[in-house]
Image (tube, helix red, strand yellow):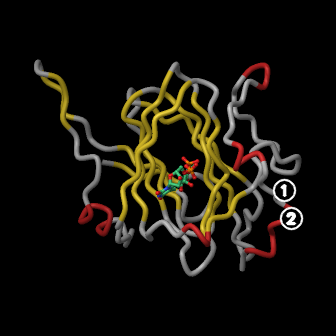
Amino acid sequence: MAFTETGIEGLLIFEPRVFEDYRGYFFESYNQSAFEAAGLHYNFVQDNQSFSKYGVVRGLHYQLNPYAQAKLVRVLQGRILDVAVDMRKSSPTYGKHFAIELSDENKKQLLIPKGFAHGFSVLSETALVMYKCDAFYNKESEAGIIYNDVDLAIDWRLPGGAAIVSEKDLELPSFKECINNFE
Ligand SMILES: Cc1cn([C@H]2C[C@H](O)[C@@H](COP(=O)(O)OP(=O)(O)O[C@H]3O[C@@H](C)C(=O)[C@@H](O)[C@H]3O)O2)c(=O)[nH]c1=O
């Protein structure tokens, strides 16, 4: 079980220890005491799961305070590019993003603290994504940034720009338009 830094404070990669044998494999996908031993005190209260096809981009999403959510993201089937944008104005990496491939094969997870916008693109034929949240969904506090924001310039690794995006997400504002949503 290992936590790796990403260069953005608080944003960590978690790699569980995988036990393989002739039957297959076993791993602890989450263990609260192991997180606490690493100084990571989260009280996850909601688990979400989504299934998407190749080219889907979900995001970039966050909830406004006091409903902001930390998330622990993993992939049960397939391969995604998971992206977290640092929206914490006091952070030295404010406005920077971090992207990582998460897959059923590499079993990596991304721990995203509050104060980030989150999204992902689907790189495999389909992907089953699961993430834990430390605050409940609150429809009224949903917010987001347009996935192809010019300032963030995220490479979603979808050649030919084949992004499949929800109608709601296509209406999202630019990064610059929502900076006042953050402290
Ligand atoms: C996020 C969420 C949605 N819903 C409902 C609202 C809506 O009718 C339907 C689909 O919601 P969305 O289109 O917002 O789903 P989606 O675009 O997958 O939204 C998710 O994107 C990723 C990137 C995140 O980080 C999540 O926090 C969440 O915002 O599900 C819930 O009931 N509970 C929830 O927690």
In this orientation, which residue lies closer to the viewer: 157 or 3? 157
Give the residue displayed 60% in from the left and 41% down from the top. 120
At which x and y percent is residue 56?
62, 32
At which x and y percent is residue 157?
69, 28
At which x and y percent is residue 100?
57, 39
Determine contact: label 2, label 1, CB under 8 Å: yes
| Marks 2 and 1, how far apart at CA | 5 Å
In this orientation, which residue lies closer to the viewer: 129 or 30? 129
Q: Is residue 159 left or right of residue 101?
A: right
At which x and y percent is residue 99?
63, 42
Give the residue displayed 11% in from the left and 18% down from the top. 22
Give the residue displayed 69% in from the left and 71% down from the top. 88
Q: Amino acid at mark 1?
A: Ser
Mark 1 C-beta to ligand 1 under 8 Å? no
**Residue underneath mark 2:** 177
Above/below status of 78 relative to 134 = above
Above/below status of 154 relative to 174 = above
In this orientation, which residue lies closer to the viewer: 141 or 178? 141
Q: Amino acid at mark 2?
A: Glu
Q: Secondary structure at mark 1?
A: loop
**Residue underneath mark 1:** 174
Q: Quadrant of residue 17?
A: top left
Q: Secondary structure at mark 2?
A: helix
Above/below status of 84 relative to 133 = above
Q: Is residue 95 left or right of residue 150?
A: left
